[in-house]
Amino acid sequence: MKYKIHKFEINMSRDQDRLEKFLNGLSGEVVAIIPNNANMTFLQIYGVTQKINFLYIIEKLAK
């Protein structure tokens, strides 16, 4: 089996449609989606939160 790893730059608050189009355009099977957690961000009201700046998408290709 062959696999391909895609790096998908993302802004989680506005890129949902772009991610959906990307995933639907893949020809193979999506095996995993791995988020990359950026530095912690301190918010006055909510405390500490982490930001996701890109995803690794692992695709299993047909033979």
Image (spheres, rainbow, N blue to C red):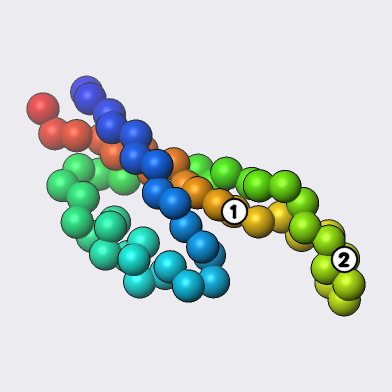
Q: Position of residue 7 (x, y in %)?
A: 40, 42
Residue 52, numbered label? 1
Residue at the disc numbered 2: 47
Which quadrant would the N terminus be assigned to in this image? top left
Position of residue 34 in the picture relative to residue 42 (left or right): left
Determine whether the residue tagged by mark 1 lies in a helix, strand or loop: strand
Residue 24's place in the image compared with 9, above or below, is below
Which residue is depicted at the point 50% across and 49% down?
Answer: 54
Instruction: Decide which of tag 1 and tag 2 comes sooner along the chain.
Output: 2
Which residue is depicted at the point 29% across and 56% down?
Answer: 23
Residue 4's place in the image compared with 9, above or below, is above
Residue 26's place in the image compared with 61, above or below, is below
Q: Position of residue 47 (x, y in %)?
A: 87, 66
Is residue 36 something that shows in the picture? yes
Residue situated in front as seen by the camera: 59 or 46: 46
Q: Say which quarter of the image contains residue 61.
A: top left
Rounded to the nearest angstrom, the CA distance separating label 1 from label 2 is 17 Å
Which residue is depicted at the point 47% across and 47% down?
Answer: 55
Q: Position of residue 17 (x, y in %)?
A: 35, 71
